[in-house]
């Protein structure tokens, strides 16, 4: 998806498709006199025939119109609302993008003044870029094509602006939307890959590739390195798997001062979660290939930050492992020692995400981060609480939580706060270790975050539970690319 802004409006210019937004009016064509005249009064006739009234999301298309350079005109109704929320705009643009996809349009010129008037240039261009990107996305069934390759021709969009100033705003918003879209595409591709292809080693290779293409500093810790560091919790999860665990570290240094403290993103990279000895039921177990979507969204956000050349330092830490049953796998009742020194009684081997994250969080401390966000498909309970629409957010610093909530609202990658309180922490008491890895049947998302809170006491931290938003829901049985938008926006807002 490529998008460029242009100030001049030229109806004779060649384009596969001219998309024009119009609002309801007694005489709709008064909004587009030049176009109406050029096409011999096509807009008037559409209205007179009752074929177009500019209702919200009404779309009509004129094939091979006379009098213009476009091979096709798509007319989009904006409806009557005086002003539209970002959600309204996105909804409308998603409908439009899907229609263009159905019409097999991959190059188009957009004249969306009627929509901009109800919102603003930045919102419209940014979400146009993302809506076109989402509609264009198709999973390519080849392990080599994680990044870059497109299923079809890349969509090329030209956005007509009223003046120089709005064209500047449009270019900047389009760049943001495009970078987020590229990050989402990477996250979707990684998420959709089967677990036998997307292994911890494969993720490590992706990081190395990103270091080549985007100048990131990457290091990968092997199991022996993790053993030296005392990561007994993380390593206990990977024990039952033949795939070696990896701890992937990526540095994006965009700040003027390379020593400026970074913001840390820590992503759960469980490339397949069978549950271990506490085996999951067979139905839908295939979906546990998505248990690395936290890691995938960290990859996507780092890619977006690099593409946008954000003046900020970011360190990404990705603990990656499989969770499988085996003769030497974790057993319920086992006690392990984390890198922090705290011991953990593993009452359920399926609560493995927190076991790999806790050591990764302790490790992150060495970068003296300004803030730490961990992103994880951590609990089924968050789907019960918030569905596939909204991610759960919890943390030890209300400022960080508020910043994330705000980033979610701006990017439309929404999150909602759940409480972390002492009364929930009590549920993690163990008779045999400092902590149990589960807190009983109630408040599962909260007790999971409470567990992590014991490993984040030395920094400002928030946790995003994306088990509901990373796949499924409106995106079908496919990865959604979330939480790339909220994370990228969070980083943009820190600049
Ligand atoms: N990866 C799962 C969480 C999950 C479940 C994500 C369903 C998406 C859909 C996680 O590792 C897990 O198994 N969590 C358990 C925790 C429980 C044992 C306390 C869960 O949510 O059931
Ligand atoms: Mn699990
Ligand atoms: Zn898991």
Image (cartoon, rainbow, N blue to C red):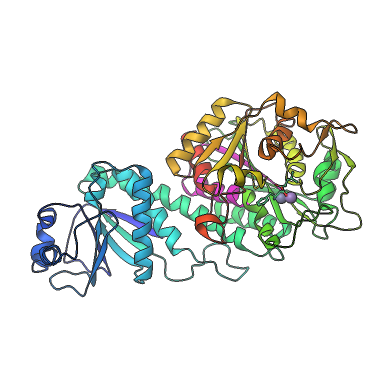
Residue 32, image x, y percentages: 13, 56
Q: Does the magenta stretch include residue 311?
A: yes
Q: In this view, does 12 lie above or below 305?
A: below
Q: Number of marks in the image? A: 0
In which quadrant of the rendered view does residue 391 lie? Answer: top right
Apparent side of residue 229 relative to residue 328 in the rendered image (left or right)? left
Q: Is residue 63 above or below residue 286?
A: below
Apparent side of residue 138 relative to residue 155 in the rendered image (left or right)? right
Q: Which of 213 and 290 is in front in this view?
A: 290
Residue 63, image x, y percentages: 23, 74
Q: Is residue 41 magenta?
A: no
Residue that sits furthest to the front in the current view: 442
Residue that sits furthest to the bottom in the current view: 64
Query: Which residue is painted at 85% across and 44% down in the image?
Result: 227
In which quadrant of the rendered view does residue 18 lie? Answer: bottom left
Q: In this view, does 419 lie above or below 220?
A: above
Q: Is there any visible trace of residue 184 in the rendered image?
A: yes
Image quarter where the N terminus lies is bottom left
Q: Which residues fall within the magenta stretch?
A: 296-320
In which quadrant of the rendered view does residue 351 lie? Answer: top right
Apparent side of residue 217 relative to residue 489 in the rendered image (left or right)? right
Q: Is there any visible trace of residue 495 in the rendered image?
A: no
Residue 358, image x, y percentages: 75, 38
Query: Which residue is painted at 10% across and 59% down in the image?
Result: 34
Query: Which residue is painted at 34% across and 42% down in the image?
Result: 85
Residue 334, image x, y percentages: 90, 43
């Amino acid at each position: 998806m490529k998008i460029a802004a242009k100030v001049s409006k030229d109806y004779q210019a060649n384009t596969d498709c001219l998309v024009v937004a119009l609002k309801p009016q007694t005489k709709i064509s008064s909004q587009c006199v030049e176009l109406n005249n050029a096409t011999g009064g096509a807009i008037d006739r559409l209205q007179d025939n009752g074929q177009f009234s500019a209702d919200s999301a009404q779309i009509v298309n004129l094939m091979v119109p006379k009098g213009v350079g476009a091979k096709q005109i798509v007319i989009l109704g904006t409806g009557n609302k005086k002003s539209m929320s970002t959600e309204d705009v996105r909804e409308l643009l998603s409908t439009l993008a899907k229609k263009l996809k159905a019409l097999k349009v991959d190059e188009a010129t957009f004249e969306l003044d009627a929509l901009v008037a109800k919102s603003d240039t930045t919102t419209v261009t940014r979400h146009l870029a993302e809506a076109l990107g989402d509609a264009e996305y198709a999973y390519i069934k080849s392990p080599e094509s994680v990044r870059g390759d497109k299923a079809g021709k890349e969509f090329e969009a030209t956005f007509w602006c009223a003046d120089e100033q709005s064209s500047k705003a449009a270019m900047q918003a389009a760049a943001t939307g495009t970078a987020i879209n590229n990050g989402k595409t990477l996250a979707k591709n990684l998420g959709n890959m089967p677990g036998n292809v997307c292994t911890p080693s494969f993720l490590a290779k992706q990081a190395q590739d990103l270091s080549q293409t985007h100048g990131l500093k990457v290091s990968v810790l092997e199991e022996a390195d993790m053993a030296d560091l005392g990561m007994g919790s993380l390593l206990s999860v990977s024990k039952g798997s033949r795939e070696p665990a990896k701890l992937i570290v990526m540095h994006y240094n965009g700040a003027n001062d390379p020593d400026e403290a970074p913001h840390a993103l820590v992503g759960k990279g469980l490339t397949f979660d069978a549950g271990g000895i506490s085996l999951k039921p067979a139905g839908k177990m295939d979906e546990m290939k998505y248990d690395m979507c936290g890691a995938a969204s960290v990859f996507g956000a780092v890619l977006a930050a690099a593409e946008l050349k954000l003046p900020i330092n970011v360190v990404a830490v990705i603990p990656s492992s499989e969770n499988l049953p085996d003769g030497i796998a974790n057993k319920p009742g086992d006690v392990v020692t984390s890198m922090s020194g705290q011991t953990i009684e593993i009452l359920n081997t399926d609560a493995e995400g927190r076991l790999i994250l806790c050591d990764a969080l302790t490790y992150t401390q060495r970068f003296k981060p300004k803030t730490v966000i961990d992103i994880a498909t951590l609990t089924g309970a968050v789907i019960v609480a918030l569905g596939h629409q909204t991610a759960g957010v919890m943390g030890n610093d209300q400022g960080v939580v508020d910043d994330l909530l705000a980033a979610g609202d701006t990017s439309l990658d929404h999150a909602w706060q759940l409480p972390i309180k002492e009364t929930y922490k009590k549920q993690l008491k163990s008779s045999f270790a400092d902590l149990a890895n589960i807190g009983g049947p109630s408040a599962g998302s909260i007790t999971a975050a409470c567990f992590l809170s014991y490993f984040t006491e030395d920094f400002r931290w928030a946790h995003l539970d994306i088990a509901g938003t990373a796949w499924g829901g409106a995106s079908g049985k496919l990865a959604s690319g979330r939480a790339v938008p909220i994370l990228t926006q969070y980083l943009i807002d820190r600049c």
